[in-house]
Image (cartoon, helix red, strand yellow):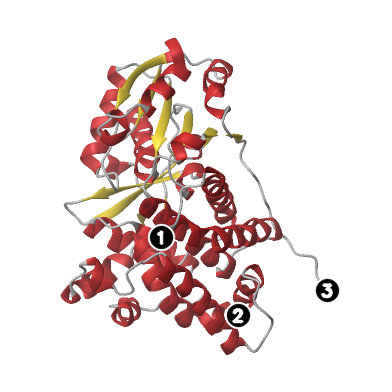
Amino acid sequence: MDMLSFQHITPPLRVFHGPESLGQIGRELARLNCSRAVIFCGPWMAEGPLLERVRSALGERCAGVYSDVQAHSPVASVEDAAEALRRLEADAVIAVGGGSVIVTARAASILAAENRPVQELCTVTDDSGKLKSPKLLAPKLPQLIVPTTPTTAIVKAGSAVFDPVEGKRLALFDPKTRAQGVFIDPELIGSAPRALVAAASINTLSMAIEGLTSRASDPIAEALLMQVVRLAAQHLPDTARHDDPALRGDLVVAAVMCGQGTDHTAAGITTVLGHAIGARYEKDNGLVNAIVLPHVLRFNADAAAVGLAKVAAALGLPRCEAAVQLQMIIDTVTNIFTVLGVPGRLRELGVPHEDLPELARLAMGDWFLRGNPRQVQSASELQHIMEAAW
């Protein structure tokens, strides 16, 4: 038996979990020699008492607050945020919130440092069809995260901003914008609405399943992602019934592990359609994931048999014939989504049927598509999946 060849490099990350975690921010800023941290958050956070807890934890190291973050990180909003970082002479960023806040903070840090239009900084497809990310060499501000939702964006290096003119996402990638510290505080993670927690955790579960079934993996990543599937399957149904901080803490930890694990695997059609549909119709990616995941699993089944066996094991399902196992996986995740009251059809999210061809065309340009276990030959295949989910 040949020895498996792989590389697994985990970037440095300091995670603080529990009631005392928020009190560590000042110490971490001192360790990083930062004295002008700018807090990023959404308007609802800026208007409530929780922001004062974060500001108090920073003490004199708080240089200001940027509270105009918008959902899905549209380009104009990110450009405005970058200008705020320059104006406030920031030397660190504290992102307090969910995925849009975290992504906006990272992307704004890139724009502020590189001082070029986002179109010159994003990943593009060259003439040979290969994706090419420009080298973003300028130093970046340290990123510290105080999450309110269990989003995998917490530990990622990519920042996708939405261009409403073109109707597509622009992907920025810079490893220097990875979070250096994560502070999981029970009161902050308890502040998010149940529906938002559920949607973010559905996205975590979907990403973990796609990671386990993708073309690339390694044993360490597989261990992380199988634990993610276990935690998500165990705790997701309870998110609709109560706001237990221990449960939410586990889901945030699952999101962190999923973000780290999928750095070493790949994503696929479920993630791609979440991107294409979520930003265009202002829906949480997790809701789209829940609707399309069963159909994507069927599409990928023959090419993803080994990975599906790992998913089944993580869900605690018995070993059986492949077709039966596939249906058991689909039934298990569908039952979870039903308990959460997630819509079962794209039309219930307000996606017009006549938009499906254009959505399929846009999705073909998403670089995550290259990790799908079954090669997607044309936009018509993506449209067929969406037709089945419509």
Q: Which of the marked residues, 3 or 1, is nearer the chain's N terminus? A: 3
For the residues marked 3 and 2, what is the alpha-carbon distance in whole angstroms? 20 Å
Name the residue at the top extreme.
60
Relative horizontal placement of residue 238, taking residue 387 as reference (left or right): right
Quick one: label 2, few (<14), some, or many (20+) residues within 10 Å? some
Relative horizontal placement of residue 120, taking residue 207 as reference (left or right): left
For the residues marked 3 and 1, what is the alpha-carbon distance in whole angstroms? 33 Å
Q: Which of the marked residues, 3 or 2, is nearer the chain's N terminus? A: 3
Residue 1 on image: x %, y %: 83, 73
Q: In this view, does 79 lie above or below 52?
A: below
Residue 216 on image: x %, y %: 59, 64
Quadrant in which residue 97 is drawn: top left
Mark 1 = which residue? Answer: 367
Q: Does the image show residue 346?
A: yes
Give, as a three-letter code, the residue at label 3.
Answer: Met
Residue 289 on image: x %, y %: 39, 65
Residue 302 on image: x %, y %: 55, 84
Mark 2 = which residue? Answer: 305
Relative horizontal placement of residue 114, taking residue 336 as reference (left or right): left
Q: Which of the marked residues, 2 or 1, is nearer the chain's N terminus? A: 2
Quick one: label 3, few (<14), some, or many (20+) residues within 10 Å? few
Most foreground residue, 105 or 365: 105
Q: Does the image show residue 128?
A: no
Screen quadrant of the C terminus: bottom left
Mark 3 = which residue? Answer: 1
Give, as a three-letter code, the residue at label 2.
Answer: Ala
What element does badge 2 sit on? helix
Quadrant in which residue 221 is drawn: bottom right
Give, as a three-letter code, the residue at label 1.
Answer: Trp
For the residues marked 2 and 1, what is the alpha-carbon distance in whole angstroms? 23 Å
Give the number of the mark in front: 2 or 1. Answer: 2
